[in-house]
Image: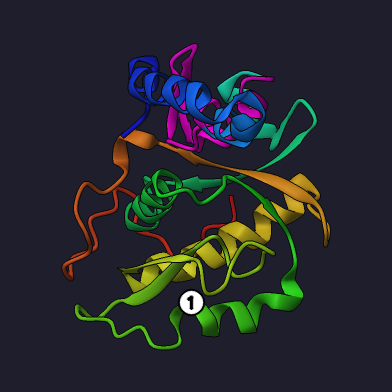
Amino acid sequence: MPRTKSRLLLPVLALAGVVAYVGPAAVIDTVTGVFESRDPVLIEDEGHQLLVGGDGETKARQCTVLVALTTRRCGDAKVVVIDAAKMPFIARNIHLAWGEGQPSILTRNSAKQAANRAAACGKFVPKNGGSCDEYSFATTDEGGSGARTEEVPLREQRCQGGAISAGYAKAKVGQGDSFLVVIASPAQVATAGFAGADVADVQVEQCAL
């Protein structure tokens, strides 16, 4: 679930004890980790909403939500959008992956796509007639064996392929470029795993956004 500042209290108290025991120099990396949480963050302004991983919050706040979703740029960040109204189960996988430490800032590397896909989903066995989805994306440096996987409808997989390809084109994400992943229509993120029924509000396969 999206984080709140109160969740930082216990880690900070625990860190104080560590500093007292081993000294401040030994815990610089720990301090950085505490205050750069990757928990998903809900951003809302002017009636528009998006979800982003905690590591991408600063970049996502460089512009309004509407600007990020329509222009695919937010300050100096290139933005790729996953619409939960069309891909609720893929959005769920991304949301959960962020909570487990996967980044929302990725680096495009399409040359790794086949190897990353095989490493993440090669042994995946769908149980409900769906397909393996992985995050981080297979077309990025961050994809591969460490990706989070979950079963999603085949239609969503086809939709996502077009959405990512079009997203790269619209945001002008070249090979080696970093980009920010955000989730549009966050209220439509699936609350449970795929069990065989496509529950998307907008059920289309051609999802060039």
Dot 1 corresponds to which residue? 120
Residue 79 versus residue 118 in the image, above or below = above
Where are the magenta residues, as a range?
A: 34-62
User: Which residue occupies 36% across, 77% down?
Assistant: 131
Name the one closer to the observer, 14 or 163.
Answer: 14
Residue at the far top: name it: 46
Residue 43 shown in magenta = yes
User: Which residue occupies 59% across, 32% down?
Assistant: 27
Query: What colouring style does the render use?
Result: rainbow
Name the one closer to the observer, 173 or 109.
Answer: 109
Q: Position of residue 117 (x, y in %)?
A: 55, 79
Q: Is residue 69 visible?
A: no
Q: Is residue 129 visible?
A: yes
Residue 168 shown in magenta = no
Name the one closer to the observer, 119 or 60.
Answer: 119
In this rendering, the count of numbered labels is: 1
Q: Position of residue 206 (x, y in %)?
A: 51, 63
Crowding around mark 1 (Cα neighbors within 10 Å: few <14, some 14 to 19, many 20+) is: many
Residue 58 versus residue 160 in the image, above or below = above
Q: Position of residue 161 (x, y in %)?
A: 56, 67
At label 1, the amino acid type is Ala
Disc 1 is placed on an element classified as helix
User: Which residue occupies 21% across, 46% down?
Assistant: 191
Residue 112 versus residue 82 in the image, above or below = below
Looking at the rendering, in which quadrant would you find the N terminus?
top left
Which quadrant of the figure has residue 55?
A: top right
Which quadrant of the figure has residue 187?
A: top left
Residue 73 versus residue 143 in the image, above or below = above
